Image (cartoon, rainbow, N blue to C red):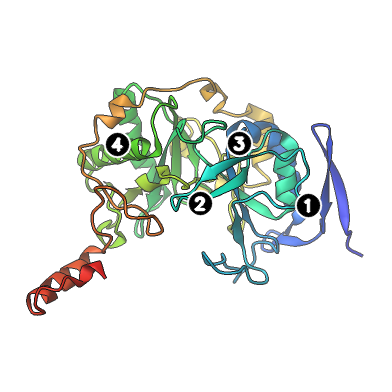
Amino acid sequence: MAAKETFLEVAGREVRVSNPDKIYFPEPGYTKLDVVSYYAAVAPFMLPYLQDRPTALERWPDGVHPGVKMAQRGRRVGPGEAFYQKRVPSHAPDWIKSHEISFPSGRTADEITPTEQAVIVWCANLGTIVFHPWAVTAPDVEHPDELRLDLDPQPGTDFHDAIAAAEVLRGILDELGMQGWPKTSGGRGLHIFVPIEPRWDFIDVRHAAIGIGREMARRAPELVTVEWWKENRGERIFLDYNQNARDRTIASAFSVRPRPLAPVSTPLTWDEVPESEPGDWTITTVPQRLADVGDVHADRWGQAFDLTPALELYDGEEMAYPPDYPKMPGEPKRVQPSRNADLTRGKAGKGGLDRAED
């Protein structure tokens, strides 16, 4: 008979694990207890990446099975669907801390801010597969202390193209007097985190990412793009500058990703990046890596760079925000270029009605 519950001791707290035998990753056969135990094992190394950061939980309470989908925004979560938890669950114990954050819409929410290892394991028991920390640290949740550079392979490119783009990025950061710490995305991409002084708002940090991305595209136009519209990206690596906008997050270091073999977003040294493959790091290999070498990004704590040199790369030309954002100052039309061109041609024959604004 399957066990109904078990308990794990995590840094002095006993954390309950319900339905430990439930299958979460059917292809390798990983159970819920396997996932929660993974998070218990890596919690000492993962906590610094989450400490006091408002963190959204990507929950897959029935596991990562073929056909399971993410619930659509604004709709009630259906049976078996995955969803984002952006508010503290009502049944959270009193040792789960939170902080109020503001969304682009102006609404607010109290979001979990992990303060101890047991919080990570408690969240994992809720079916949390991915932890999505904001780029801010409470109590100052209006000034990011990380610049996050997400290198996202587009169709026709792969992880090795992302590696090449990362080397271009590394050279630019070095010229700016900044240092980035790379990690796998858990998919085909790479994330480079740059700790910064918390003196700029989300708009400024996003502009710095745009400036760096444009400089990458100038130096390697066949390899890198910052084009927001997919139809214009081509077979290139997209630097997703909007990951630095308010309420946009990137999977934490050591987060599992909801893919069949339970890959993990794993910190790497720059020397390791060219030798890595996306499938190298999973919930079975990462704990041993940590036992062998520890966290290779441990030297980043306490460092914070001046964002000014990166902001000087931004030329003032605004780019599109995500579609769920309110219209932002200076933002161009949110109309994909092919559709906008068609409507522009139609405008001349329809009495000047600009339906691109509809």
Q: Is residue 300 left or right of residue 176?
A: right
Q: What residue is shown with label 1?
A: 33
Residue at 44%, 45% (x, y): give it. 246
Asked if residue 198 is positioned above or below residue 254 in the image, the reply reads above
- Position of the C terminus, as image quadrant, is bottom left
- Picture disc at residue 107: 2
Tell me whether circle 3 and circle 4 mark residues in contact (CB < 8 Å): no
Q: Depth-wise, is mark 2 or mark 1 nearer the camera?
A: 2
Tell me whether circle 4 and circle 1 mark residues in contact (CB < 8 Å): no
The residue under label 1 is which amino acid type?
Leu
Q: What residue is shown with label 3?
A: 50
Q: Position of residue 355 (x, y in %)?
A: 21, 72
Asked if residue 238 is positioned above or below residue 73 in the image, the reply reads above
- Position of the N terminus, as image quadrant, is bottom right
- Picture disc at residue 212: 4
Residue lying farthest right?
1
Quarter of the figure with residue 99: top right
